[in-house]
Image (cartoon, rainbow, N blue to C red):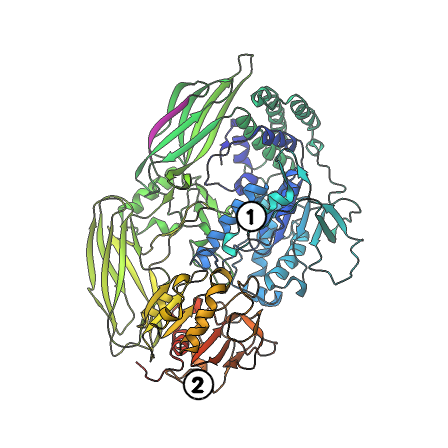
Amino acid sequence: MIRSLRPLAAALLLLTVNCSLLTETKAQTPKTYTSAEILLGLKKLNVLGSVMYLAAHPDDENTRLIAYMANERLLETSYLSCTRGDGGQNLIGPELREGLGVIRTQELLAARRLDGGRQFFTRANDFGFSKTSDETFRIWDKEQVLADMVWVIRQRRPDVLITRFPPDARAGHGHHQASAILAAEAFSAAGDPKRFPEQLQYVQAWQPKRLLWNTGSFFVKPGENMDGYLRLDAGGYNPLLGQSYGEIAARSRSNHRSQGFGSAAQRGEALEYFQPVKGDKATKDLFEGVDQTWNRVPGGAAVGKLIEEVIRKYDPSNPSASVAGLLKVRDAVGNLWQNAIAKDAGLPINKPTTAEQYWLSEKDEQIETLIKAALGLYVEATANTATAVAGQPIEVTYEITNRSKWTGKLSEIATSPNAIGGDTLFYKPLIVDKSIRTTKRQLIPLFIQESQPYWLREKGTIGMYSVPEKTPLGSLTKVSLGSKNSPDYINKKKELEANPNVFLARQLLIGLPENRSAIDGIVGLDFENGKGAKMHFRLQVPVQYKHTDPVLGELYQPLAVVPPVLVNLPPARSYVFADAQPKTVPVTLRAGRAGVSGRLALALPAGWKCEPATFDFALAAKDEELTVNFQVQPLAGAAPGRAELRATATVAGQAYARGIQKIEYPHIPTQFLFPEAVAPLVKLDLKRRGQNVAYLMGAGDEVPDALRQIGYNVTLLEPKDLTAARLKEFDALVVGIRAYNTVDALKTKQPEILKYIEQGGNVVVQYVVNRGTVMPEIGPYPMTLSSDRVTVEDAPVTLTKHQLLAAPNKITADDFKGWVQEQGLYYPSKWDPKYQTVISSSDPGEAPKESAILVTDYGKGHYIYTGLSLFRELPAGVPGAYRIITNMISYGKEVAQ
């Protein structure tokens, strides 16, 4: 985001906390605007109305309605998602939990960039599928999620709230139900100053006009009369954008690639229905009784007329001709700011934002964006490196291009937060269509912490993320100061004392979709048109990393601040010991800066041995890597079950125990996570039959590595390899999660798989989603897949006397203890009698589900379908999961190994 820091507006930002604190930062190509988009922006400048959509997850939102509200009604439109979708499945890669939450956050931001909305979140954690709101509220901190909702509502001041779901079982998912229940409570609480009064030092209580439920045919009973509902046609065509709102929505929704939500465009009429929930009743329009003109701001009517004049005179072939008119609008808004300041004279400096100030701030920012767009002004700041360490210098290249007839000059380049290097004054003319490129060496302040997403910096609970109590603007937490005896601590403390205003309270982080940029460049520009009109810009530009991919072209990503040394263990790997033989634990060190040295060690529980005990390292160059192989083995006193190992590098008295995880997909900016260098350490009693396993990957999982940990030789096959002759080389074929949803070739390869089974092979198929299968039957005999699941991970299990549970390992109820997130999903609801059931379990209050494992003989071989969430349990080091999948692979074989 490029943001104006006009002195008057900047002064007000010091006095108030406005919506810009909740505006997403965008790691992307600096935005340029077409002539039509500028005209649409001018029209939006004259609308003072706001709407907020509320639901539970990424992809729950109605993208067509958001596109309609933002681009047809020209409202400030936002989507508040309770969660970041961490508990879902991933159709495009192996990331789960926190990594998936980061992907889905960025997918939402990509969607909003297309449909025109803004994106916000609460601290609720998507802990997986929930069947009821009661269960959800047992795991979420309901009052905390409600407070977060109220905070965002008070920040954004929506006139109308709209929910996606009803507050009952029709919503399907417990999170869905909970989002509707919380929305109704937040509607009332936001306007009550007695609720969450700690927020009122920043904002005022705000009462939306009404709360509506965006219902539809999928929620109503067959034949139900919907004539009494409010309705609108959201399928219209926007000639300035050249698309219908259904077309925009399809492009927006198709950003949810991790969920497989690619959508076809819709054109023509698209009716949306709304049922009143709370607030003033409306009879014809959602915004009845809401003044959406400049009359909302005292003295604002004159501003509206000035904007109308700019729109009337707008020349699409020469947008810069509108700049003089926009400067008059800006001056008029500035006068209203002055009036607001005068009104508030003598009030405390941290007084809450008023409704008047909210709209002045919103429109002031829009005016600056429109002026910049009309000038064709291009400004970017790019670093010479993708990662950097606090306290180290980087080179930042500034590019400024004036593509208008206005005369300009570059007057200043500075850094925010303030850093050593200071400001640089320039007096360089901005010649039309001639770019200025200048490189400045800038030091990243020592108090800037690693670029870990702010909601992951502290350990939360299963249901809630934790946000640091006090965080410097550049992303610091109190623990990042390090040891009090270290030089870094002393230097950082000095910097913080010299910059007392760099901290953000926890409250000001809540709701943000992502971190602020690590550092920003400040670019001062002066323009005049030769006819007496003059202006000064002071633009805040995020410093990003830019590179050119030979296939995808120019790409931007956030500049990531990293620790001096990164400690990486293989991702999603458990170290599983079925005997006393040592295993290699590779630890890869990566230098965040040049010239880093120290000592690396593994911390193990009692009864375990490690060689070497420690390793001294020295990394000369930035990004240099060194892999140290530790040999780990259990001794006679090692306790059975799950423990953990931890890798730590000590540099100059400071311990570092986090690695770096790069998340890279073409539809979102590259992201970095800094996971703890911790891995499950499992000692178990395990016997297996067979040695060679073929694995067909589906949507992506870490099961092959888990099988290698227990001694199997695992070969990843391509669909072309699925012939009976090739499969005959293996003791079993294991089919990855959702393969029958994602591997189209299975339509033609299924006969070869069945032939392999018929000739004596063993096939284990992991869960398949009940919609969108590539073929009607995934097994040798009919079964009907469903969305049935057992969401309580420790639900009691009833075991049959089936041979699968008897050999080579005796499976007991203890093997289902310590599971994570869920027990299983996508269980068949019907199956041919030739399938045998093996276990049964259920969520509280439900009938037992018997199809978590289905086994059948086919010819000389065996087929097993399982909905058990082995793809989660194996990487988490759950001992019982290893014993169960070993029995599946070994089924029907005689000799245990």
Where the C terminus falls, by quadrant? bottom left
Q: Amino acid at mark 2?
A: Gln
- The picture places residue 670, in percent across and down from the top left corner, at 41, 46
Residue 439 drawn in magenta: yes
- Please give the label number shown on residue 120: 1
| Residue 654 is inside the magenta segment | no
C-beta proximity under 8 Å, tags 1 and 2:
no
Q: Nearer the viewer, residue 378 or 34?
A: 34
Alpha-carbon span between mark 1 and mark 2: 51 Å
Pick out the residue farthest to the bottom.
801
Counting from the top left corner in percent of width and height, residue 339 is at 63, 28
Q: Amino acid at mark 1?
A: Phe
Task: Give me the residue at 53% from left, 81% from top.
Answer: 834
Tell me residue 229's x, y (percent). 77, 52
In this picture, which residue range is highlighted in magenta?
434-442
Which residue is disc 2 drawn over?
803
Earlier residue among tags 1 and 2: 1
Is residue 179 left or right of 841 when viewed as pictured?
right
Viewer-nearest residue: 823 or 368? 823
